């Protein structure tokens, strides 16, 4: 318990210092928000990647995690593209790829949502429990 | 302190526990059916995880003992599904493979949590079959996880293992996770 609290506190302080450093070094507010979003994106991708490889190969949950990971990667690339566009002042055709990326990310989210709907149906045991006619109810 | 017993009746009166039942090969199926039948006869609903015999076979045998099958949620990890993945029928969830431990864990969690009574059981048949398809280290980790979950769920947890030489080492390792070892 104490050990966990220490870890959480250290992580919280690290994030706080990171945010402070970004604000100090990057004067542009829009760019600051971009960098913050990217750092959150990296953490999300790393955690999802670790989760994927902790799960057994060929399982439904791992498949769902894969969809989720691809969506996160595309959103991350979309954010990187947006940041570069801001820094390098891109115009014209350079701005369109990011819209393509976000559309694909949403499309993969649709597949992920369908997968979780399927998982919900497969792992839902409510109809079987109703057949049990149980008298005692949980308090 | 770890209790040792030679009869399943030693579990009577205990509300929630994690018991490792070591059964000899010749009366393996008979003992399993007896344990489940006794629990259901006492009005306790639960989850039967089979890695050893297909659901149809278990259902037939329990049915012949007049066990109320509506009180049991079956999870079958031995019957091969068409797609090799999970498939659901009204009475059983087919996992597709005994190596599919992630789906098996989710299925057990969901099934146990769906039963609204305080008193419920989880019957896991068997550790020996799990060892045929997975590495010893993976099985030890899985059983550690399973016993921990059984305590959180507050169920009557029974893990069955065949009495054989190659399982001895793992059983020794698992002793510390269980409340009771029953030699049947």
Image (spheres, coloured by chain):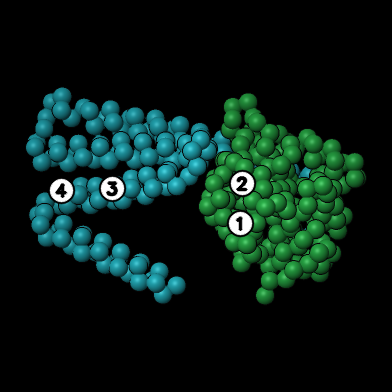
Same chain assignment for discs 2 and 4: no
- Tell me if label 2 and label 1 are in contact, CB under 8 Å: yes
Label drawn at residue A134: none
Which residue matches tag 4?
A31
Could you tell me which secondary element the residue under label 4 belongs to?
helix
Which residue matches tag 2?
B131
Residues under labels 2 and 3: Cα distance?
Answer: 38 Å
Q: The green chain is which one?
A: B
Crowd tier of the residue under label 3, counting other residues whose Cα lies within 10 Å: few below 14, some 14–19, many 20 or above: some
Foreground tag (2 vs 3): 2
Q: Quadrant of residue B18?
A: bottom right
Label drawn at residue A42: 3
- Tell me if label 2 and label 4 are in contact, CB under 8 Å: no
Which residue matches tag 1?
B170
The colour assigned to chain A within the rendered structure: cyan
- Tell me if label 3 and label 4 are in contact, CB under 8 Å: no
**Mark with earlier residue (2, 1):** 2
Horizontal arrangement in the rendering, residue A77 relative to residue A119 (left or right): left
Quadrant the C terminus of chain B occupies: bottom right
């Amino acid at each position: 318990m104490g050990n966990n609290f220490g870890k959480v506190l250290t992580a919280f302080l690290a994030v706080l210092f990171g945010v402070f450093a970004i604000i100090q070094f990057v004067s542009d507010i829009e760019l600051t928000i971009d960098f913050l979003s990217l750092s959150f994106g990296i953490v999300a991708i790393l955690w999802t990647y670790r989760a994927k490889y902790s799960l057994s190969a060929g399982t439904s949950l791992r498949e769902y995690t894969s969809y989720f990971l691809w969506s996160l990667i595309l959103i991350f690339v979309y954010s990187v593209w947006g940041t570069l566009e801001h820094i390098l002042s891109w115009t014209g055709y350079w701005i369109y790829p990011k819209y393509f990326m976000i559309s694909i990310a949403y499309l993969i989210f649709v597949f992920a949502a369908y997968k979780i709907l399927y998982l919900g149906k497969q792992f839902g045991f409510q109809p079987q429990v109703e057949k049990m006619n149980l008298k005692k109810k949980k308090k | 302190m770890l209790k040792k017993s030679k009869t399943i009746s030693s579990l009577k009166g205990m509300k929630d526990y994690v018991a490792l039942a070591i059964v000899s090969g010749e009366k393996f199926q008979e003992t399993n059916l007896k344990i489940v039948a006794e629990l259901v006869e006492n009005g306790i609903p639960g989850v039967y995880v089979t890695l050893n015999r297909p659901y149809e076979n278990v259902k037939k045998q329990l049915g012949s003992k007049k066990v109320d099958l509506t009180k049991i949620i079956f999870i079958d990890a031995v019957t091969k599904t068409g797609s090799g993945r999970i498939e659901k029928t009204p009475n059983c969830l087919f996992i597709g493979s005994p190596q599919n431990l992630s789906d098996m864990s989710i299925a057990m969690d969901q099934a146990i949590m769906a039963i609204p009574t305080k008193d419920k059981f989880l019957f896991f048949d068997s550790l020996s079959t799990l060892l045929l398809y997975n590495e010893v280290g993976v099985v030890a980790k899985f059983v550690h996880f399973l016993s921990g979950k059984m305590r959180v769920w507050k169920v009557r947890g029974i893990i069955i293992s065949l009495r054989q030489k190659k399982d001895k080492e793992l059983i020794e390792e698992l002793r510390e996770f269980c409340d009771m070892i029953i030699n049947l």
